[in-house]
Amino acid sequence: MDYVATMSGTPRLGAVDLISAVLDPGSFVSWDAPVTRPVDIDPGYAEELLLAARKAGTDESVLTGAGRLRGRPVAVLAGEFRFLGGSIGVAAADRLESAIRRATKERLPLLAATASGGTRMQEGTPAFVQMVRITDAISAHKAAGLPYLVYLRHPTTGGVFASWGSLGHVSVGEPGALIGFLGPKVYAALYGDPFPSGVQTAENLLAHGLLDAVLPPDRLADIASRTLTVLQPAGPVPPVDPIDDDRQANVPAWESIGLTRRPDRPGVRELLRFAATDVVPLSGTGQGEQQAGLQLVLARFSGRSCVLLGQDRSVQAGSSLLGPAALRTARRGMRLAAELHLPLVSVVDTPGAALSKEAEEGGLAGEIARCLADLVELAAPTVCLLLGQGSGGAALALLPADRVVAARHAWLSPLPPEGASAIVHDGDTRFAAELAARQRVRAVDLRASGLVDRIVPEYGHAGGEVAAFCRRLGNVLAVEIDAVTDLAVHGRSERRAGRYRSL
């Protein structure tokens, strides 16, 4: 096999072997026509191209084509770093644009495996501006509702990283890969100092919410396959337990609140573990922020695919309450749902938003407002699940939906009941139970007022039947995803906002 070495000297696959490692054996068919060079090409540059072709075993810095990935058809763009550092000139851009637009026309998912130092300096500005049309072709592919998956290999820098390398619905990095806008050699030459170490690495980008995963090539097919599975047509939904809240005990609000605060109560992690399949975790905002309090995943419930935004009760405490970065991650999920033509499921389970200097300066209130606006206007069908605690603006931010489902003991309140008591009773929190009852926070009250469409029973309490409760939720979500998918698109935002009138 042919390899490219990383910064640490670890060998990495070239383009041909990368394609062979990811696609099903014997399935790849090249889309590349022979490269035609200008007749007036500079002789020195022509010699460089000949030497590059001998070194790389390819005729350009990118290879394109189609094949099968775990049996599914997919189009591929693969960079070859050994060909003049994987640089993109006019011929490479011609090849890329042609392949991207063909993939769009044939409605194929697109997998891009980058490895490039950026623009080809031998061609100068004409090569530099090619990133515009490549980006346009990628944008058209995504606008057609087709998935675009990116694997950033070592190294990926410059114009490639700043265009088609940064537009993936799902973005994965190669372990130890150098990934950055300005390569360290160029930085040192321009500024006389080395670039700070440890910044331009796949692992650091993952930590900052710029990548969704860091995986070696032999695991790339797995995450790509799971992502494509989420986009497959749905099968039949299993029957759902018809029992609603009517046969359950009418417990006080304060008792329900106490049950949602139990440490053994299942949250979004358990919901995904017991009720979802083909889960593809995504990471952060894609813009340099990450917060652990919100899960963003692609997943399926009983064969129904969705983008899921889930407030994670397991990590929300003290200084880890939901802040603006979590809500910006949620808004990334909303955009994904719209671009991939997938339903959106939001899961509310939070003791409240962060109250801190950082949250205020980070624009928490504005992000709550933008989440509300985005959800009301979102082109994708939506389902909200009130899973547990639903306190304050952090809960409200994920509430607007075509259908709202609530667990039996879930609740929704403008503040934690203790906070409401403090406001009404001059700092005294002892009236929290009384305020909770008066404020109609329970799932049954929300259903009676039209804020909730369906209640999912809890037998005893959810912590005593974790797996069964989560599977029950998953089946209900599948039915509700079907229901919202069948709703008329016209008037969607009006219907979402309309449920809050005349309460």
Image (tube, helix red, strand yellow):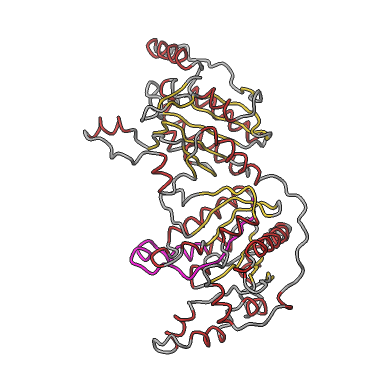
Q: Residue at x 65, y 23 (%)?
A: 26
242 lies above or below 101: below
- Nearer to me, 346 or 498: 346
Residue farthest to the front, as pictured = 464
Q: Residue at x 50, y 35 (%)?
A: 216
Tell me the quarter of the picture where residue 124 sits. top left
471 lies above or below 212: below
- The verdict on residue 437 being magenta is no
Residue farthest to the left, as pictured = 192
**Residue 57 place in picture, x, y as percent:** 50, 15
| Position of the C terminus by quadrant | bottom right
224 lies above or below 485: above
Tell me the quarter of the picture where residue 111 sits. top right
- Nearer to me, 128 or 350: 350
**Residue 273 place in picture, x, y as percent:** 60, 55
Residue 266 located left or right of residue 48 = right
Residue 219 located left or right of residue 68 = left
Q: Residue at x 67, y 72 (%)?
A: 459
**Residue 176 place in picture, x, y as percent:** 41, 35
- Nearer to me, 40 or 300: 300
- The verdict on residue 353 being magenta is yes
How many numbered dots are placed on residues in this image? 0
- Magenta residues, start to end: 342-371
